[in-house]
Amino acid sequence: MSITEASRAGISALAAAAQRGDGIALARHGRVIAEVVGSDELAEMRRDRDVLRDAALVMARFATDDGGRTELDALIDSLGFSRAELELELDREVASDADSSERER
């Protein structure tokens, strides 16, 4: 349906058609630029999109997983830190945040 035809039909007619499940493609200069669909159909499309995204992530993980695992301490060491240093830094940040919150009161 052209934008002009849709304008003549009115938003109420477009909404009623969408609610019935009749998606309406809107075209400008013969090219579809939008589609009016009901909220149930839109919710279903969003659920499908989420399921497909999750499936793609699982497939990508499966395809690239070599089975190797790295212990957290080994990773920390490879980055030039130690667990004790990171814990001390975290303790300082938590204490600093607590002091800031107390001063704001």
Image (cartoon, grey):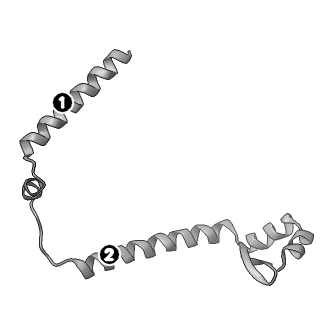
Label 2, label 1: how many angstroms apart (C-alpha)?
38 Å
Whole-percent x, y for residue 8 in the image: 92, 71
> Considering only vertical position in the picture, is 12 above or below 60?
above
Q: Nearer the viewer, residue 37 or 26?
A: 26
The quadrant in which the C terminus is found is top left
Amino acid type at mark 2 = Val
Q: Quadrant of residue 56?
A: bottom left
Asked if residue 23 shows in the view, the reply is no
Q: Nearer the viewer, residue 79 or 30?
A: 79
> Considering only vertical position in the picture, is 49 above or below 75?
below
Q: Nearer the viewer, residue 38 or 7?
A: 7
Q: Look at 24% across and 79% down and name the residue there.
A: 64
Q: Quadrant of residue 101?
A: top left
Whole-percent x, y for residue 79 in the image: 13, 55
Mark 1 or mark 2, which is nearer the start of the sequence? 2
The quadrant in which the N terminus is found is bottom right
Whole-percent x, y for residue 24 in the image: 76, 77
Q: Which element is circle 2 on?
A: helix
Q: Look at 7% across and 41% down and name the residue there.
A: 84
Q: Is residue 89 left or right of residue 30?
A: left
Q: Look at 84% across and 64% down and name the residue there.
A: 11
Q: Is residue 52 left or right of residue 22?
A: left
Amino acid type at mark 1 = Arg
Tag shown at residue 47: none
Q: Quadrant of residue 100?
A: top left
Number of numbered discs on residues: 2
Q: Look at 13% across and 39% down and name the residue there.
A: 87
Q: Is residue 65 left or right of residue 29?
A: left
The residue that mark 2 highlights is 58
- Badge 2 crowding class, 10 Å Cα cut-off, few under 14, some 14 to 19, many 20 or more, is few
Look at discs 2 and 1 and give the one toward the viewer: 1
The residue that mark 1 highlights is 92
